[in-house]
Image (cartoon, rainbow, N blue to C red):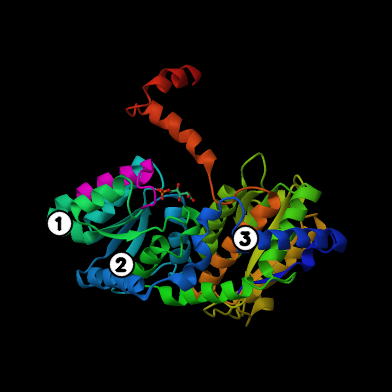
Amino acid sequence: MVKIDLGACGSFVKETEYQNYVAKALKAFDTLIAEDGAGNDFLGWKTLPIDIDENLICKIEQVRDEWKAKGVELVIVIGIGGSYLGARCAIEALSHSFVRPQGTPQVVFAGNNLSEDYIAELLDLAKIRNTACVVISKSGTTTEPAVAFRIFKEYIEQTYGKAEASSRIVAVTDAHKGALKTLSTQEGYRTFVVPDNVGGRFSVLTPVGLLPIALAGFDIRAMLKGAAEQRVELLKKSETNAAVQYAAIRNLLHMDYNKAVEILVTYSPKLVYLAEWWKQLYGESEGKDGKGIFPASVTNTADLHSMGQFIQEGSRVMFETVIKVENAQREVKIGTDEQNLDCLNYLAGQRVEHCNAMAQLGVKVAHIDGGVPQIDLSIEKIDEYNLGAIFYFFEFACGVSAYVLGVNPFNQPGVEAYKKNMFALLRKPGYEAQTEEILKRI
Ligand code: PA5
């Protein structure tokens, strides 16, 4: 379960101001529960952890087991934005940082960029691995994953033959529409559905996230359990509800204290993609109508040696939300050295995680002194259960927070702007009129 502690904001805001925003957040909570706010046709994510059908989980596990039986060593997951960040977050957090367990495929991601070098290097890897592919696109029309899929589909068909390719490619897309749906039906791919009422960045607990996570060897049932239990907690209307508190304090800091940037701070390289997932969730949900808090992130202690200076003494526009993990999964102690040339004997016998914890406390005091309020969130450990809980926590809090801000959390109209220009420049049929216009401006 996610716990929240606002003690490190106490010296920045007055209790009465905070209570005022708690009242706003409770009103927003009511809107989210009553489902009568903006974007209320995209609230399917609220019940995903309890709605999920056992047959769907079995179908996911069947793909995992079949590919294992085929000796698949590499799974290329193609998708962008909400169609890959949740899966990548979970897989990076749960995987061993350096060693892959025997018999478990390596899961890698494509279709989230248009870098030719990246695709060429991934083809190099596919050529020396027994390869399968999952292509994910809710709309089924997004250019980046479509380009990558065309390339890897061709590679898989040429390498394994067309018939075998159709058992090595699985699609996750809309139930009825989109180019990917049409193509999958024609080619006979197994498909999973992204529910109509779940937007991309809220879809990690659908097959969009669950299929890649299961293929990487992780326990999706435990993840759903964590999300379901977090949901029970968050449905309790109370001023101590963690999502209400988070929504209240971040809006107070933003609106009354001109804090324009929220930095999600983690202290483990395993959580880099948790921050990437969170940035998309909050950035796309809140950044519209000229409003919103810019979501940024740092991974400490590495970034204390790059961004630390700015956070300590630069423009006072930011607050931090720190994710504390109570327990490391492994234990490594610092040894004694007779010569003590590195002068570290004062740490002899201590766990490395103790140093990490002291760094967190030291940073907290320094940043408070430097004028940076800190919201503390904590989870017990990095595992499937707690990741499920944190996914659900941030999604629910995002809905509440965006309603306090006064925006529709569930659309992303601004994402379209670049696409029209790119299509015109790529001379996509239908965009001819815009091409000359854009060429004149660049
Ligand atoms: O949150 C969203 O809706 C977006 O980030 C989408 O996930 C992203 O644009 C990818 O879209 P699609 O799954 O339709 O390819």
Give the spatial CA distance, label 1 vs label 2.
Answer: 18 Å
Give the spatial CA distance, label 3 vs label 2.
Answer: 39 Å
Where is the N terminus found, in terms of image quarters?
bottom right
Identify the mark at residue 71; answer none if there is no mark.
none
* Left or right side of 201 for 350: right
Residue 74 rendering spot, x and y as whole percentages: 28, 62
- For label 3, the crowd category at 10 Å Cα-Cα, with few meaning under 14, some 14 to 19 and many 20 or more, is some
Residue 194 rendering spot, x and y as whole percentages: 39, 58
Identify the mark at residue 105; answer none if there is no mark.
2
For marks 1 and 2 on the same chain, the one whose residue lies earlier in the sequence: 2
In contact (CB < 8 Å): disc 3 and disc 1? no
| Residue in the foreground of this view, choosing between 262 and 255 | 255
Label 2 sits on a secondary structure element that is loop
Mark 1 lies on residue = 160
Residue 231 rendering spot, x and y as whole percentages: 57, 72
- For label 1, the crowd category at 10 Å Cα-Cα, with few meaning under 14, some 14 to 19 and many 20 or more, is some
Mark 3 lies on residue = 32
- Magenta region, residue range: 137-156
Q: Residue at x 36, y 68 (%)?
A: 216
Q: Is mark 3 within 8 Å of ligand 1?
A: no
Label 3 sits on a secondary structure element that is helix
Give the spatial CA distance, label 3 vs label 1.
Answer: 48 Å
- Is residue 398 rendered magenta in the image? no
Rendering quarter of residue 10: bottom right
The three-letter amino acid code for the residue at tag 3 is: Leu
